[in-house]
């Protein structure tokens, strides 16, 4: 168990809808990363937050947004969903461990858009 | 830009065979980290190893060993005496320093390893 929790585990929704994925980092970790794993794009970085502020952005669509709250949990909002958004979405939190920052991954949220 | 190439896409071996998974990376950073993750059929990402760019010592952990060669920008992973439980997708990944904007993980496409009994 990495200590990172993600809810829900599975999500099935229709095209055009909006969903929110939630991530709680390990206790004390300030950084949260979101990654998307799809069959055609593989595992790719979406966005990073550090202590409530956006730190880096990757290949994140404009229909997607994220935020990190004062209690450090993070939410990824996906709107106007398309079939191609079906993927496994991972959250990771980063903390100092054994001489470097380590990213610990949550179990993922599997999103199916029908 | 950072890039990780895992040229092998699928490997199939018989139990007890040794298997090496290749990883080649590109980065302009002088300090960086390399990782291997395992993704079993259940879907979670399991951390296997992190290697710092300034530490080229090879590492062995049980049946697993890693060979880091800066000269060829490679970080290969060998499983000795493979077992059926080793069947999974294996990802090599690269990140820059610490918590900054370059700390995101860049993943390779992954290698699907099937170990047959």
Image: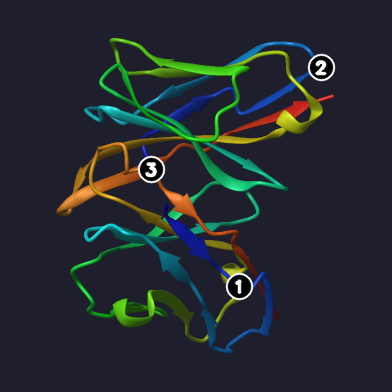
Where, by quadrant of the figure, is residue A69 drawn?
top left
Badge 3 marks a residue whose secondary structure is loop
User: In the picture provided, is B72 more to the left or to the right than B20?
Assistant: left
Percent position of residue A75, x then y: 47, 17
Residue tagged by mark 3?
B104
Q: Nearer the viewer, residue A21 or B31?
A: B31
Q: For the point 59% across and 61% down, which residue is it?
A: B110
Say which of marks 2 and 1 sits in front: 1
Using the image, name the chain to which the residue with label 3 belongs: B
Badge 1 marks a residue whose secondary structure is loop
How far apart marks 2 and 1 lie (CA) works out to: 36 Å
Percent position of residue A64, x then y: 58, 19
How far apart marks 3 and 1 lie (CA) works out to: 22 Å
Q: Is residue B98 above or below residue A10?
A: below
Residue tagged by mark 1?
B7
Q: Is residue B43 visible?
A: no
Q: Residues within 10 Å of mark 1 (few under 14, many from 20)?
A: some
Q: Say which mark, if any, is on residue B116.
A: none
Label whose residue precedes the other's in the sequence (3 or 1): 1
Using the image, name the chain to which the residue with label 2 belongs: A
Where, by quadrant of the figure, is residue B29 drawn?
bottom left
Q: For the point 68% across and 11% down, which residue is it?
A: A18
Looking at the rendering, in which quadrant would you find the C terminus of chain B?
bottom right
Residue tagged by mark 2?
A14
| Extreme residue in the bottom direction | B17
Badge 2 marks a residue whose secondary structure is loop
Q: For the point 30% across and 16% down, which residue is it?
A: A52
Where, by quadrant of the figure, is residue B77 drawn?
bottom left
Say which of marks 2 and 3 sits in front: 3
Percent position of residue A23, x then y: 45, 24
Q: Nearer the viewer, residue B18 or A54?
A: A54
């Amino acid at each position: 168990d990495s200590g990172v929790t993600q809810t829900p585990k599975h999500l099935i929704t229709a095209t055009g809808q909006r969903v929110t994925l939630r991530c709680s980092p390990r206790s004390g970790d300030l950084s949260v990363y979101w990654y998307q794993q799809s069959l055609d794009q593989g595992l790719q970085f979406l966005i990073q937050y550090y202590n409530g502020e956006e730190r880096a952005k990757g290949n994140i669509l404009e229909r997607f947004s994220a935020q990190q709250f004062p209690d450090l949990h993070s939410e990824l909002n996906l709107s106007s969903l398309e079939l191609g958004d079906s993927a496994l979405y991972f959250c990771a939190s980063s903390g100092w461990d054994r001489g470097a920052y380590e990213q610990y991954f949550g179990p993922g949220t599997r999103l199916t858009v029908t | 830009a950072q890039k990780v190439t895992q040229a092998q896409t699928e490997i199939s071996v018989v139990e007890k065979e040794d298997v090496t998974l290749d990883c080649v990376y590109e980065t302009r950073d002088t300090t960086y980290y390399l990782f291997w993750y395992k993704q079993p059929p259940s879907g979670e990402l399991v951390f296997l190893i992190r290697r710092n760019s300034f530490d080229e010592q090879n590492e062995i952990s049980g049946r697993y060993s890693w060979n880091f060669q800066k000269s060829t920008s490679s970080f290969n992973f060998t499983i000795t005496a493979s077992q059926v439980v080793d069947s999974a997708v294996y990802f090599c990944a690269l990140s820059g320093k610490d918590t900054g904007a370059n700390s995101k993980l860049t993943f390779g496409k992954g290698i699907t390893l099937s170990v047959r009994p």
